[in-house]
Image (cartoon, rainbow, N blue to C red):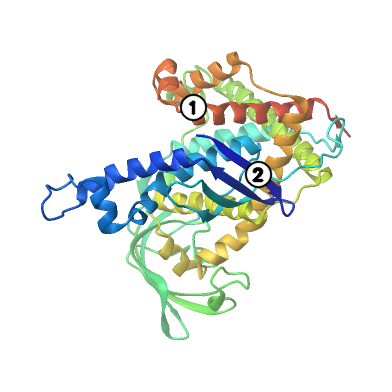
Amino acid sequence: MFMITKWEKTEKNLGILEVEVDPGALAQALDQAFKKVVKKVNLPGFRKGRVPRAVFEARFGVEALYNDALDLLLPEAYAKAVEEAQIEPVAQPEIDVVQLEKGKPFIFKAKVTVKPEVELGTYKGVTVEDKEFPVTEEDVDKELENLRRQHAQIEVVGEGGRVQNEDLVMIDFEGFVDGEPLEGGQGEDYQLEIGSGTFVRGFEEQLIGMTQGEDREIRVTFPDDYHVEGLRGKEALFKVHLHDIKRKRLPELDDEFAKDISEFETLEELRADLKNKLEQRAEQDHRTYLENQVVDKVVEEAVVEVPGVMIEHELEHLYHDFADRLQRQGIPTEMYFEVTGSSEEKVKEQMRPDAEKRVRTSLVLEAVQKQEGIEPTEEEVEAELEKAAQSMRMDAARLKELLTPSQLDSLRQDLAIRKTVEFLVANSTSA
């Protein structure tokens, strides 16, 4: 395919790509379009799909093939023109067909939004504020207490027993505001841990002291910052019936406990292992903290005008992840919006600053990566493939076969950006 390509920038991140494709390429596309279209054509005197080209064009006109020919020719011509012009589009182009006529060159213009240029500021030797992530014996104690709670035995509290903090209770409840039933404020056989903060402040505290089979009326006031705007500052009445009470019996912290829940023989060995894991976590938290500090500083020093289309694309990605998380929890987005008084538009508006920051950060890190020529080695790529294959319980060679070239390129680019962040941290100083 012979082409003449002309790229002209009209604004900072916008330009017009003018492309002229030779008549021969259009003729081939028309031939392919005819072979596709003729299969569905029925004309008297001809078997279905056997109508000659000349008869078809005499009856319907060559224009009947233009749309299909365009579908075949345009994507390839645009991709080749982008490569020749050496531009990086960040969104689908706006196409304007200038000339599409049999026997003549195919001419089109594409309005293209391209990746913006980044003017890097200082990125080597940036100074960031450091802080410590100490691990104390109290932290180890908290981990042990969490383990005790995870391995607690649940016992039914008999008749006459009263609800205490941290008990597990089963209740029916019905809420009212201004004498009217509260939407979403009803439940039957609802399992609740007292002190979990699941309900509005004051609700769980007023259950303390109840006995099995008791009915009680509870009054609470919704806080001024409550997520449902119409309920802020309003008082609600809940009618509650208590079915049963269960209580956690925590195991003793001793060597037997250590043997029961771990591979260690003594409590001291278990403590030492927990402390080691906490120190590893603290080390990772410290590394992440430094990385965030350095990257934020480098992005702040850079100048880049982010195209709105890139922010919108990232916004859609963030919202899709948000909806997926809700779905995995069994919560339809419609139900979430109804309960919270929110909407897709409101959620996206809250996400917008984060979306813009993500795009800006990505552009600046990529600019540093290119400036420094940072690329992963083949050994690093293979190691990453091995790690991914292990997590999916498959052979690394098989995984590599399944990945498309673009997926492998994405993997390499992700590794390159990761190495770029490491480079920036290594070349920074801490105050």
In the picture of the structure, the residue carrying the numbered disc 1 is 405
Sequence-wise, the earlier of marks 1 and 2 is 2
Q: Residue at x 60, y 25 (%)?
A: 277
Mark 1 or 2, closer to the camera: 2
Residue 47 position in % (x across, y down): 11, 47
* SS at badge 2: strand
Q: Which mark is residue 388?
A: none
Q: What's the CA distance linking mark 1 and mark 2?
A: 28 Å
Residue 96: tell me if it is visible: yes
Residue 51 position in % (x across, y down): 19, 47
Q: Amino acid at mark 2?
A: Lys
- Give the quarter of the figure containing the C terminus: top right
Q: Residue at x 45, y 20 (%)?
A: 400
**Towards the viewer: 235 or 281:** 281
Q: Are marks 1 and 2 in contact (CB under 8 Å)?
A: no
Position of 363 with respect to 330 (left or right) is right
Residue 385 position in % (x across, y down): 50, 21
Classify 369 as above or below 18: above
Q: Amino acid at mark 1?
A: Pro
Residue 254 position in % (x across, y down): 52, 26
Residue 201: tell me if it is visible: no
In the picture of the structure, the residue carrying the numbered disc 2 is 6
Position of 287 with respect to 257 (left or right) is right
